[in-house]
Each structure stands twice: as C-alpha cells, then as structure tokens.
Image (tube, helix red, strand yellow):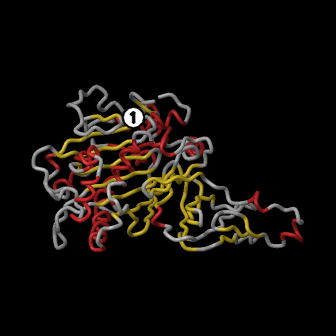
Amino acid sequence: MTITKAVPRSFYKDPAVLDRELTEIFGRNWLYVGHESEVPAVGDYVTRSMGGDPVIMARGQEGIRVMLNSCTHRGTQVCKVAHGNTTTFRCGYHGWVFGNDGELRGVPGRRALYGPDFDLSRLGLRQARVETRHGLVFATWDPDAPDLTAFLGDFGWYLDAFFGLFPGGMEVHGGIHRVNVRGNWKIHAENFSGDGYHLQVAHRTMFELGVMGDQAGTVEGFVVNDPSGHCLRSQYLADEGVPETVFGYEDHLLEPALAAADPEVRRFREKTTVIHGLVYPNLLLITTAPQYFGEDASGPVAFTQLRVLTPIDQHHHEVAYWSLVPRDASPEWKAKSYLYVTRQHGAASYFEADDLENFRRIDAGLGAVAGERTPYNYELGLDAAESGAPPWNGPGRITRQDFTEANQRTFVGRYLEQMGERA
C-alpha cells in the first residue's frame, strides 16, 4: 500500500500507537541485530535490542544465535554487559545457568528442589529466527514470517551492491555508538528513506563549505522503493567529467571489485556519490565519499554507516551507529574512513546536528493541541513528470526525481498496512 496525501499526527505522539508498534512492526519483521565481524570467535557475544526486547547475539559452535536476554524463571536479564566471550550466562537473581546457545544447563538445587523429572530442555532462552546477508545479521520473532530473501524483495539487489562489492567482505570498525534522540523514531526513518528535499535548507552550510567537493552541482537524484517498505535515494553523476576518485576507496580494492561486479551493479555504484536508505522498518544505511580540507586533506574518502532506530517512548528513540569498512583495506585507510564518518554523520557531526535539531523541533510542534487537525502532508512529487529512464537497470520502483516523497509514502504506507490502518 502506498499512501496518497496525509497521515494523522497521532501516529507520531500517541503512546497507544507505540504499544501497537512493538507488536505489529517490531514483532513481525526482520530486524538488523549486528554484524558477523562483531562476534568473530566461538563464545563471542554482544547485547542488543529488537524493538523493545533486549537480546544477546552470540556465536556458538553451530553459528550465530539471537536470544531473548531474559531468564525463563523470573525474567531477569542474564547478561548485563555490552560484549565479551563466555560459555555460559548466569542469572544474577536465582543462579540459573544458560549456555551460550541459550539452552538451560543448570539450576541450583535442581534435584532436591524440583525433583528428578524437572526438564531443563523446555526452559532455554527464547530463540529468534536468524539469517544473514553479506555479514549483516537479521532476526525475527515471527515463526510465520517469510525468509529474509523474500522479505527484502527487490531491495536485496541493492544490499548486494552495498555490501557485496568487495570480495573480502566488510567489517565493523570502531565499535558501536549509541545516542538518545528527542523525536519519534519514524521521523528519523522517513528522513533517511529518501528526503532530498531538505538538503539545501537544513544542510545549507555544509554545501557552502564545500564538504561534498565539486560534485554537488553535477548530480541528479533518484529514489527507489519496494512495496515491502524498503527505500533508498541515490545521487548519480552526469555522464561527463566523472572524477577517478569518486569512489574514495584504495585502488587495490576498487579495481578488482569493479572488474568482478555484475555490469548493472557496476553501473549503479561507479557513478553514485551518495546512497542512503532504509531497510524497513528501522535499519538506516548511507555510503558516500566526502571531501575534507585542511591538514588531513587527501581527496574523497568513502565511508559506510549503519544505524538502528529503537523507540524509547513516543517522544524519544535510541540511535545505534556502526561504521563498516572493507576487510582488506589498509589500517591507515580504515582509520581515515572512520574519522570521516564520525565528522560527517556521527552522533555529534555536522549533518547530524542539523537533523537532530529538526527532529527535536518536530516533536515540539507535535505537542500542539491545535495541530491535531493538521495532518502530515505527503503530496510532494505526486504529479511530477519523470525526466527519463534511470541510468541503471536495477530492480524496484525507480523514480528519476529527487524532490519527491515517493519513498516516504512507501514507508508510511507499509507501516499503516501492518498497523491495520487505512491510508
């Protein structure tokens, strides 16, 4: 379902809506939990959230599992730290012990207090379904959800173009950063889904400073979306005058990667200066190659960032940030890529400060009682004529327009459909 014009403001401020979201949105879809490189060895684990549910992502002898971080006795979180390596998790309340595979291994006084027939096998930590794609670990609680490939639909091609370009794969660099943000999580999701309309206003200073180099005036925007709610926006260079350094990667990585890539993936990636988007419902991604000036100026340096949005309440959400780099890149390049993503899109970066301030102001405006009768408007681009066919033959609904809310309509339409609402 794609919405047409407007959405009630109550969907961004009503606490009852959030309660339903935790079940209908976060409880039914595949959610990004982490990256395989964060748990490289058997016994490694990290603690994360799936919507409102605390989980443990752990690597065992049989691969990666995602388990509810909640003891099956009284619900106590069995793991209190962010990451580590262990063979067991011990509940700090009554001492129940679980293996790193989630199975219940021991109960104090088991035979004396529970009797010889007490069955440990039925009381392991709740297990989520887990699938991976190019090192990205997704999980869902829904036993009836389609597999990850079906869930991603046409957007799977773009994830392959994002994360499958380099034969050695990608890895997390610099750990994970978390920030609590004022504003409903859906506002952030809509922004990243493909909002090219706000750039020259909200981020005007960054363009005036020349952060994007000489490319800003030579690109045209495209948006891509899938009926499942996944979206992206691409800034694509004109055919003439493509700088050799546009990718911002080291030559020893880029040349063999492009040579081995599918021709359409190569066509899509080799002239795209910015790609950002949303894997429905709450995984955001961006890759670009900004230009910086000063002592460390060295031409464009690419970065790839992932974000996960987790609602705290109807007025606040947590943002978790990951930086990904090609596994085979040099240590010097990895450090510079991490520096650049921190400067441009980190929690205290130039672009982030602009967006987070607007999210705060949106939330403040939502509090106006008089505004209840003024729904959000999503008409931008409804009647705009496209300017021709896209320059690559990728899947999905591709629109050759930058100033359009086609992606926002897709995201919100899918959201309302899953919430059982009419657009």
331 w.r.t. 185: above or below:
below
Residue shown at 40%/51% (left/top)? Answer: 284
Residue shown at 16%/54% (left/top)? Answer: 208
358 w.r.t. 400: above or below:
below
Q: Is residue 293 left or right of residue 328?
A: left
Q: Is residue 312 left or right of residue 113?
A: left
Foreground of the two, 334 or 177: 334
Residue at the limit of the structure toward the front, as seen here: 260
Q: Position of residue 355 (x, y in %)?
A: 34, 52
Foreground of the two, 161 or 185: 161
- Disc 1 packing (10 Å; few <14; some 14–19; many ≥20): many
Residue shown at 38%/68% (left/top)? Answer: 173
Q: Position of residue 186 (x, y in %)?
A: 45, 45
* Quarter assignment of residue 386: top left
Q: Is residue 300 left or right of residue 418?
A: left
Residue to which mark 1 is pinned: 409
Q: Amino acid at mark 1?
A: Arg
